[in-house]
Amino acid sequence: MPPTSLMVADNPSTSLSIASILSPRQMNIRRFFLEIHEFDGSLRGASVRFKATSGIGHLLRYQNLDKLDRLNFSEAPNTKLKGNSKANVSRYSEGPLSSVENSRSVVPLRRWDPDVGDFVDEDEQNTSSTSGRVFQRQPENDDEKLDECGSFPDFENSLRPKRKIKRFQPLGIERLYGRTKPTRIYGVLNARGEVPGTDLAPVPRRYRERCEDQKGWTVKEVVAKVLELNHWDDIDAILNDWVGRYNRKNFPPLIKAITSTGALNHSVRVFNWMKNQRCYRARNDIYNSVIWLYARHQRVDRARSLFSEMQEWRCKPDVETYNALINVHGRARQWREALNLFDGMLRAEVPPSTKSYNNLINAFGSGGQWERALEMYERMKKDGIAADIATHNIVLTALKVGEQYARAIEHFEAMLKWKVKPDRFTLNIIISCFYNMGDYDEAIKLFNSMRNMRYSGCDPDLVTFTTVMQVYAACGQVENVKSVFEMLLGVGLVPNLITFNTLIGAYASLGMDSEALQSFKLVEKAGFEPDVVSYTALINAYSKSGKPDEAREVFELMKRRSRKPNIVTYNSLINAYSSSGLVTEALRLLLDMDFENIPPNVITICSLLAACGRSGQIERCQDVLKAAGERKISLNLNAYNTAMSVYMNGGMYEEAKEVYKTMQLQGFAPDSVTFSILIHGASKVGDIVEARNHFKEMLRVDVNPSVEAFSSLIHAYAQQGMVADALTTLNEMKESCCAPNIVTYTSLIQAYRNAGMPEPAVALFEEMEASGIRPDALACTTIFSVFNDCGKAEKTLQLWSKLKLSLNLNEAAYLQLIIACSIRKDWKTALEIFDSMLQAVVKPSSKLGNHLLKCIGTSGKVQQLMKVLKQLKDAGMVPDRLTYDHVISSFSRAQNWKKCIEVLSWYSSENLEPGLDAYRMVLQHLERMCLWRDYLEVYYRMLSSGRSPDFAISQAALDAMRKTGQKVEAEEFQPTVKLLRIQELNTLKKAIKASGYRT
């Protein structure tokens, strides 16, 4: 006996459609919480009573409505099948419908299949549509087990279809945008819940004949085949060969998979193909995927056009749509359009999420609107939207971009108070803020905290190590930069191009060109292609080391490798020529920049002005200033100060004052640097009155005097020997809370030295050391000379032994040290100082070499003297006449007369002529040795060189003639000797008479 009632439920429209098919179009409708459609009909020849309901996700059990007249939702079993069927049919057992036990015997029995046009059995064995594998579905509850035991077998046989249909499970679970959404996909689920492929079973009947030869690829396989082609190839042929194109529910996972790869052109081709399919229906998730892809590629116009297109297709934008659009405008720094979209989302009654606020705050931050970013963050908290760690990171980034580093650190400290756990990205931002503030110690301390795992899960990553390398590079600690680089390699991180550029820049900042070149080659070995920053850093390294030719070679290599130089590259190359004084080549680069359509900036003009100053071509500064005017480059205060400094150093004081007047006409107020240059320039020309007037003018215009201004005025007083005025200025400097620096102390020490006051100079130097100021090369030179002048050469050597390991001296300081050794006749210490000078690559002057040779020669170390002479020549010293005089004197003391005569021939190799003193030393030595023939030979050489002998030399020559048997020549030469005798006596008498001495 068939049951007296059946219930059909899926959704309102489907229930009504099924009821209309099965009934003779006569139904009674009851309205409770939902509509109940009742009618009498026939099924397989049997009369049945139908009741169709429209539940939401449930097939509801109901009591006898005639007696109870209500629905019992609490005990309704979930018997809705997960599938693509248009209706679910269940049956009731015989018995009173008011019985609870009977009412609970509802089990799923039949499912309406629109493709078959009939009910299909759910309890049959289901066959996989791809592999043909047969599997048995397990019963879900006790009612199903009751059905398996054989209840109503006759009715089941009467409803069972006469042919078997391949079964499939049509529901897959896809994770979209961080949330789990059910998505119906044709195919059979595997063990991981994925859809391996499709076949003809789920394809509608009207499509089966035309797609028998098509492929049942998975979505991943389709995407892989599409990406194997170029975006201009025939991608439609691949997609048209896919059987999944006949069902619209395959399109969302396809577009999501292809857009997740980031392939923009391929994704656009797939999306356009999809819209041309007959079964395509526009959906929000499809458009959202494509809009997010355009956001990743910063295609603002295309994203907005898709936004308009989806509205034309009657797809209402949801929160993900607005999030994508706000994000793409934020990436393009269009914060106003992002704000308009946010307001439009509120007008459309789309509730914003945390991600919405994050994207808008990020848009404000990228546009430099940190104030608006903070306002939106406060509004977010007032609206009750919980801020996550991404929100805090975006706020910190906005403050960092806006150069509000102190506010960023305050926000970070507030995060810690709110017990918000920072992540690695947060700590990287804070380290960068400390670096930009110049608080390098705090940056290193935070880095060490990350390494010591104070913040769990926040181990340093590549960005962290790169930022710390920049911190050490800013401090000039190149060794620490290299150590951090080796450290990141040790922890298994792979450096990127930014890391390599930081390493090259660290070496370049100190002019270590060989190390920078090795790092540059390491970039190529690591598989990276050097960019403009890499080449510019290497050019800067050669610029700092004074190698303009090598810098030019790197510049040409850069252009050969199709890397276009930018303004920073040209400025570095101009600086390379400027450091070597090659002003012509530097100015030629200005024309090259015009040809490459790269407009020069103020830094370019400052570099060219500095090139004019270093080359000594001060007159060409006017050409540089004229070129800046022709190119409409607005000079700033730094450029005017540079021009004045170049004119002042070149002794062109009036031209510097003209630049100063032009600067005032352009509306620039002078600062302390300007006045320091003017005071220093006035002191160089010896105009102490003008220097005082500039200092008074600085006070009149309310410019606080800097250390440089005070030091320039003290230096001006020191040059004029005005020690009292210099001390008065020093006291004023201390009263204004301006601590003296090394220049101040050096100028005062020079003032004391010029005034012949060595004791106060020494006391001032001791005061400088007590105040913690380390002397530089100029200060050491000054104090060395003070010690030597007052006869305290031992203090000079003691101070050198104290500072030699931590101070780089110049040539003048080494000269004073050699003089101190010469005073003390300490040739061993002199050689030690000379060795340290060679190691420091300091080019010796002729004066230094002469003092060194004199110190060694007076000690009788002739062999050591010849070795040092060779080293001096190799180091670049050009010998002068006094150099060889010291050599002759040394050989004369060593009784080596042959070497003395040989050294006389060395003068000609340096285009020099021996002086009378050199000949006198050789002749006196020959006279003592009684080598009269050699004496006469040297004497005649002296006469041929134009030297006039005195009476002593001539008398010795007369004696040599007599001793060698040249009596005739001696008789002829004797009157000349007598005449020289008379002349010397007359000269002596005149000198005695002029001195007032009475015999």
Image: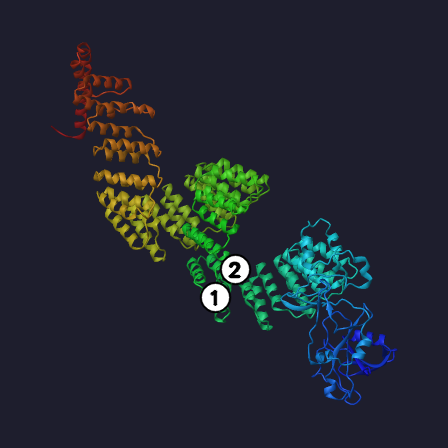
User: What mark, if any, has residue 441 been given in the picture?
Assistant: none
**How packed is label 2: few (under 14 Cα within 10 Å), some, or many (20 or more)?**
many
- In the rendered view, how is the structure colored? rainbow
Q: Is residue 856 visible?
A: yes
696 above or below 143?
Answer: above
Q: Quadrant of the N terminus?
A: bottom right
Distance CA(mark 1)–CA(mark 2): 24 Å
**Relative image position of residue 197 (x, y in whole percent):** 70, 61
126 above or below 842?
Answer: below
**Relative image position of residue 867 (x, y in whole percent):** 28, 32
Q: Which residue is mark 2?
A: 400
User: What mark, if any, has residue 456 been given in the picture?
Assistant: 1
The image quarter containing residue 880 is: top left
Question: Measuring 56% from the left and 69% from the top, which residue is drawn there?
Answer: 387
| Front one among 599 and 718 | 599
- Front position among marks 1 and 2: 1
- Disc 1 is placed on an element classified as loop
Could you tell me the amino acid type at mark 2? Answer: Lys
Could you tell me the amino acid type at mark 1? Answer: Ser
On the rendered structure, is 700 left or right of 141? Answer: left
39 above or below 237?
Answer: below
